[in-house]
Amino acid sequence: MYYTAENEWIEYNGHNAFVGICKIKLSGTNGIQNVTFCDVLSSLEQGAVIAIFHYSRSSVEVYMPVDGKIVEVNKKLLDNPSLIARSDLESTWIVKISPNAPYKREGLLQLHQYKALKKKSQGTIHG
């Protein structure tokens, strides 16, 4: 599993990968009302918004961790978007993507690098 500085995670599975967000990205938020996904038929660049979780007074954007194309969205989140906040990191994915370069890891962080970055910028990391 790899991470981004913006608190997304990516788990490669052959030529595809699952993308989700770390719980720290949701800290201080409650009452997720809905989720919207971007156009799943488009090729997207790293950093593009792929989903937005909406709250009563704010929202959390999820970004594409690498260049690629969304091939599937987690439809369970459409019915119950709060699952993203309650489920563990490994089991709650937001989208399945087909990365343009499935074996390239440039710009992604390993767990120890991610934890060090979060500890340096925010004190401690909570998962």
Image (spheres, rainbow, N blue to C red):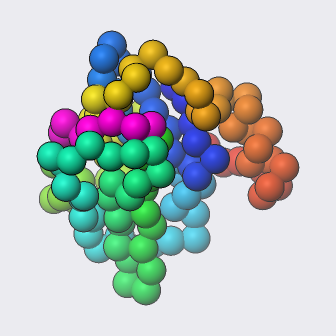
Residue 69 falls within the magenta-colored stretch:
yes
In the visual, does 47 lie left or right of 51?
A: right
Count of all numbered marks drawn on residues in the image: 0
Task: Give the answer, above or below, for where 127 lies relative to 28.
Answer: above
Q: Quadrant of residue 81?
A: bottom left
Q: Quadrant of residue 90?
A: top left
Residue visible at 58% across and 42% down in the picture: 4
Task: Give the answer, above or below, for where 91 lies relative to 48.
Answer: above
| Secondary structure mostly seen in the magenta stretch | strand
Image location (x, y in percent) of residue 74? 22, 44
Residue 94 falls within the magenta-colored stretch:
no
Residue visible at 50% across and 21% down in the picture: 104
Q: Can residue 87 be seen in this view?
A: no
In the visual, does 77 lie left or right of 44?
A: left
Image location (x, y in percent) of residue 6? 58, 52
Image location (x, y in percent) of residue 99? 35, 29
Residue visible at 50% across and 45% down in the picture: 8
In the visual, does 82 lie left or right of 27?
A: left
- Magenta residues, start to end: 66-74
Residue visible at 50% across and 71% down in the picture: 29
